[in-house]
Image (cartoon, rainbow, N blue to C red):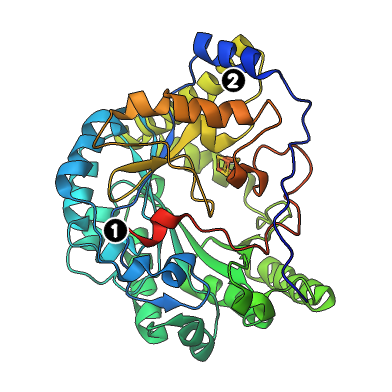
Amino acid sequence: MTLKPTTRTPTTHPAVPTAKVVETLGRVPPPWPTWINVENTLRCNLECIWCAQHLVGSTRSGVDMPLALFDRIVDQVLPRVSRLSFSVAGEPTIAPHFLDFLDRVNTLDITTELVTNATALHRPGLLDRLLPRLGLLIASLDGARPETVERIRAGARHARILENLQRFQRARLARPAGSRPEFMLAMTLSTANIDELPDLVDLASRLGADRVACCWLEVLDPSLLGLSLHAVPDRVEERLAAARAMAVRRGVGLDLPGEPPLSPRQDPGAAARRVLSSLRGGARRRSALRAALARAAVRAWELRSGLGARCSFLWGRAYLHAGGAVSPCCVQGRPYVGNLHERSFEAIWTGPEMTALRVGMFDGAPHAACTRCSQGQGPVPAPTDAWTAPARNPSDGQR
Ligand code: SF4
């Protein structure tokens, strides 16, 4: 098998003339984003074999977001946002200021999400500060057996991770039913771990997690090609079938790539009771209301502009990096559209760089990263020869 070059693939939508899109975007500005990712650190305490940030060396750079920058984000951005997620480029829980960040967040009507390697959830004071606003915790495990987890997630201790997830589950259950965060385990599927997927679903059930979410390994370096599953479709189908059967037996939700989520059969009144119960918490109710208003604002934008919001990131999300850089997404080779040290977030969100990216969704000339991305390309998925090509943003390795 050989790496093929990335091909530039136009979007499958009919092109709209550039001048017409620019005029429309100037007349009908985009709604405020509803979901923000704050990269509170680039550092990580693990060296996962397929992690893009580890491969480019940024997890060893020691860069953390300064508290003063986070305070500016709290002032400028978060009061109008419903969902805040912490770093995707490093392990959020090990950053020195993380507890201070959580103290700030607990003064806002906002719901948080945390993707974590679960190695530091025992940090004193962390769960007490995290849980009041937490809506979702995703623990990346990438395997069920200790030797698999410790081989893929180099530096991890499986026993410590399980202890921490049990600690989290106890703290979660101690909260009132309406303010309990969702609990998910995540697995990046590869030849190194696909055999253990049914066991991971079983482990999720024993830990009390709600769901297991999976994605395919994205091959970012030729050395990883042997881990890709695209050469063994029969093995994949057999393991996915076994995982689906386990999920049904254990009553655990399962999100497999390219399939509708599998949810356990529930008491028909349970979902309604959960919603009603969550509406009793003031901050959560206001955060949910803001999310609903944000969805309505995107729809209103579509109606007023006569255009569709073709990438949910360009119209509703932003990633705020440790050094102040802003990008609309975390796709490899993503564009950077400004820096919070130079301009306000509002100026960046409505500025020429973001406008150019949005225009590219309509005029048939998307940014190079967008051509490799399944967002914005209509019903046709990203080209299969594009995802094998390494795509690095040079600044990712430098910060
Ligand atoms: S790469 Fe482009 S299309 Fe994909 S999520 Fe980012 S901005 Fe949207």
Do the CB atoms of the residues marked 2 and 1 lie less than 8 Å apart? no
Figure quadrant, ligand 1: top right
Q: Is residue 141 above or below residue 23?
A: below
N-terminal-most mark, 2 or 1:
1
At 56% across and 46% down in the image, what residue appears?
A: 270
Q: Which residue is mark 1?
A: 41
Q: Secondary structure at mark 1?
A: loop
Q: Position of residue 158 (x, y in %)?
A: 42, 84
Q: Quadrant of residue 376?
A: top right
Give the camera-side residue of 19 and 237.
19
Q: Is residue 257 above or below residue 120?
A: above
Q: Nearer the viewer, mark 2 or mark 1?
A: 1
Amino acid identity at mark 1? Thr
Q: Position of residue 163 (x, y in %)?
A: 35, 79
Q: Secondary structure at mark 2?
A: helix
Q: Position of residue 113 (x, y in %)?
A: 40, 50
Amino acid identity at mark 2? Arg
